[in-house]
Image (cartoon, rainbow, N blue to C red):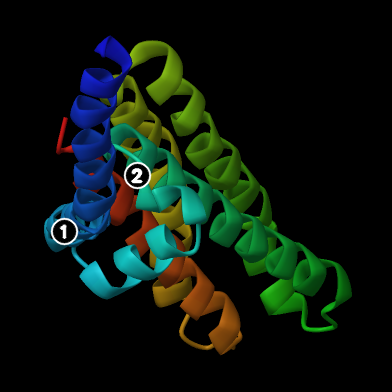
Amino acid sequence: MANFRLCLFTLPLITLTFILQPFHVMSDEAMIINVCSKTPNPSLCETCLHSDPKSATADVKGLATISITCGTRDADKLYTDTDNLYTNTKDPALHNLLDNCWWRFLGARDNIDSAGRMLSDKGSDAAKLAITRDAMPMITYCSDLFKKSPTVAVPKNIIDEMNVVSTDCQIILGILSNF
């Protein structure tokens, strides 16, 4: 008799769990939309977060970690492309300009990546510092340098990648502001 009562109690709970499961996914999507709406580029933010299947069940800290991974990936591409161009260019003016930036892009990548460790070990304020104090100035320096050298033809892909990494940093900060 007790087993029958247990079944009568358990069966509705299991049914309710399956009925409410789609609402849980919608809640996570709503959280992604809400978090990304507080960033300067909600579309890029959502694209980044949706690139990782873990975003469907992540909390805000998990979403911040995913955004840091996206930023690190984009900064790595910027560094790799800049280093390749620096190594292979025959234009001495471009070579000299990139000599000031390839290593800064490497530092920016490493500092964005370290923001993930800071978030895990020391919290969101430490992660914000890794972005604002350590990563962003390196990107800003090169952006300013490129603007001061309009006669040097910096390839569009480098400029575009630099802008993406700068936006990634702003997105990371926007997500970290949810803590």
| 123 up-or-down from 84: above or below | above
Q: Which residue is mark 2?
A: 63
- Residue appearing at x 26%, y 36% in the figure: 11
Pointer 1: residues within 10 angstroms few (<14), some, or many (20+)? few
Question: Could you tell me how far apart the alpha carbons at marks 2 and 1 are, in whole angstroms?
Answer: 13 Å
For badge 2, the amino acid type reads Leu
Residue 7, percent across and down? Answer: 28, 27
- Residue appearing at x 14%, y 38% in the figure: 178
Disc sitting over residue 30 in the figure: 1
Q: Is 138 left or right of 38, judged from the image as shown? A: right
Residue 108, percent across and down? Answer: 53, 45
Q: Is residue 96 visible?
A: yes
Q: Is residue 160 or residue 25 the one in the foreground?
A: 25
Q: Is residue 28 or residue 73 the one in the foreground?
A: 28
Quadrant containing the C terminus in the rendered view: top left
Instruction: Count the labels in the image.
Output: 2
| 49 up-or-down from 118: above or below | below
| 102 up-or-down from 8: above or below | below
Q: Is residue 152 visible?
A: no
Q: Choose mark 2 or mark 1, whichever is in front.
A: 1
Disc sitting over residue 133 in the figure: none
Q: Is residue 85 or residue 57 the one in the foreground?
A: 57
